[in-house]
Amino acid sequence: MIRNLELEKFSSFNKLNIDFSSGINIIIGENGTGKTQLLKAAYSLASLSFKNPKPENQKEQEEAFTEGFKRIFLPEELKIGKLSKCSESNCSIIKADFIEKMSYDKKIKFNFSTRVQTLKLDTKDSTKDDLYSMEPIFIPTKEVLSLYTGLKNNPENKEAFKTIFDESYFDLCNQLSRDSKDEFEPRIEVFLEEIVNKIQGKFLFNNTVNFTTGKYVPYAKSTIESDKSKEGKRYFDEDSADKLSTHMVAEGFRKLGVLHRLMENETLVPKKSGTLFWDEPESNMNPKLMRLIVEVLMELAKAEQQIILTTHDYVLLKWFDLLSNESVHIRYHILSRDKESGDIVYNFTNNYNEIEPNPIDDAFEYLVDEEIVKDMGL
Amino acid sequence: MIVFEDVDGFKFEFKDALNAYIFDEKDTHSPHFHGGFMKGVDIIAEYEEAYVFIELKDYDDEFAAKYNVLPYRQQTSEPSEEEQEQEKEVRKSFKWLKNYLKYKYRDTFLYRYAEAQEDKPVHYICLITFEDALNSIMRKSLSDELPIGKKGRRWVNGIAKSCQVLNVNTWNRNFAHTNETHRTFFKCTVTHLAGEN
């Protein structure tokens, strides 16, 4: 899990220091306060550490991280310096502190400025031995299953796709394309069944992605010795051979389908995988499906999966509040813009009622006020 | 300025009102005693443009949860038996409160008819200490049933001009008499006395 993230003179931030909860972290803020940037910064450090676990030398590590940051942030002209806000030597900082397997503390820190071509590793504040090795997952805002199909069938188009999608999309497609397992730990099986029963079917990943309706049912009693091992177990029973194109399936189901797939191929395994980052789970989603998403996330967090997500949706946020209980720790991280200086200000709370300022409530209030003025206006 | 120091735990300061009085008067000798036959709203305020009927309900957070139908409106999966029972209870409470607010208004409206005081449009404001989202749902249900506007083809008059269900914050944000710019004809500050302690 990621314990702490520090950003200085980076992207839209002057200075930001965040302690993350090991449970659920919800980043709230108006548009333009850097929610996605924050998420991407934390993801980049975790993901690039995972991809380059044993760098040969410092130079190689710096180059790999520079390239990775450029691919995820897609800065202007693909120059790393465009992510810095200052020109003095080493004035911009990106730093993260990870905990691996609940005990090993692993730090990584880079400096850079508008003038440089490469990130510079701060060896004093970075762990010397192997890097953080728990693979994170990033679910971006845009729909990803179409891109998955496109990449599978026309890999030659990858270069063209790379001009449109940042690396997090390709990372996720890569994770989705891993083979699924046949046998699961019982606790994972529970999740898989729960999602399938909620969306009343599952997605099948081949060269294309199709949705097939069905549910989990127990194996029939058998007298054949070799089948006896299946007694008490359950399997996915397809309703029919008909497959639905993913485009026919609600966006919320598709998002849960992504989660299902990641668990089915053991990319997302609580306690084993790294942080689950999710940028605006609510995008393109019917508000009625929000509860489903929040329920699944709460269950994952209860199984000790760290989750960091961004939102500006009232319904999603409210569901976290309504379904919250003592077994899951939720921390709300609030980004806002200081009216005078224009700087991004950060604060956090563990209590939903203390979120201040709360742009989501504000937007709701605005609508209520307009309604009152329409009825009782001068 | 017309001030009521304490009406069911709230202080009211009306600005620019032609008149304002406690409507739900229990004292039979009071000039504002309207007869004990029917229900009455708590306060009526008169403005140049309209009458405003005000009804108050003060619930603490825990109690408010018993009325919160919001979670059930978005249920997608099959609820358990226990959840179904809870939902039934919550919906029952919500319906009870909606009917309570509805009949308070309608009865008051009849009193006013009997008193020949129905010469201006009437706005109904319920001050309820729920959060905005739940108040919004209550407002919609109540508006449908009062009803708001001229609902029948043959109606010449409407029964209510508008209906708002607001908490103290939203009330003051829109109506506080100290607001620098007023966008509504109704100007009144409300203070939650219990909330001050």
Image: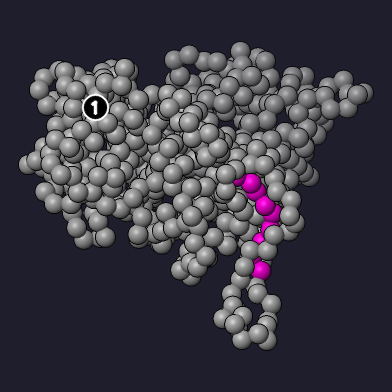
The question of residue A210 being in magenta is answered with yes
Q: Which segment did they paint magenta?
A: A209-217
Judged from this view, the residue extending furthest toward the right is B154
The prevailing secondary structure element of the residues shown in magenta is strand
At label 1, the amino acid type is Phe
Q: Quadrant of residue B145?
A: top right
- The structure residue drawn at horizontal position 17% and vertical position 37%, both measured from the top left corner, is A60
Relative horizontal placement of residue A45, taking residue B84 as reference (left or right): left
- The structure residue drawn at horizontal position 70% and vertical position 26%, both measured from the top left corner, is B162
Mark 1 falls on what kind of element?
strand
Query: What x and y, as percent, mark residue A177?
Result: 48, 47
Query: What x and y, as percent, mark residue B46?
Result: 65, 22
Determine whether A111 is above or below A128 in the image. above
Q: Quadrant of residue A302?
A: bottom left
Picture quarter with the C terminus of chain B: top left
Residue named by callout 1: A10
- The structure residue drawn at horizontal position 34% and vertical position 30%, both measured from the top left corner, is A71
Query: What x and y, as percent, mark residue A307?
Result: 39, 49
Task: Evaluate whether residue A91 shows in this view.
Answer: yes
Q: Nearer the viewer, residue A228 or B187?
A: A228
Relative horizontal placement of residue A116, taking residue A68 as reference (left or right): left
Q: Nearer the viewer, residue A355 or A70?
A: A70
Query: What x and y, as percent, mark residue B13?
Result: 50, 27
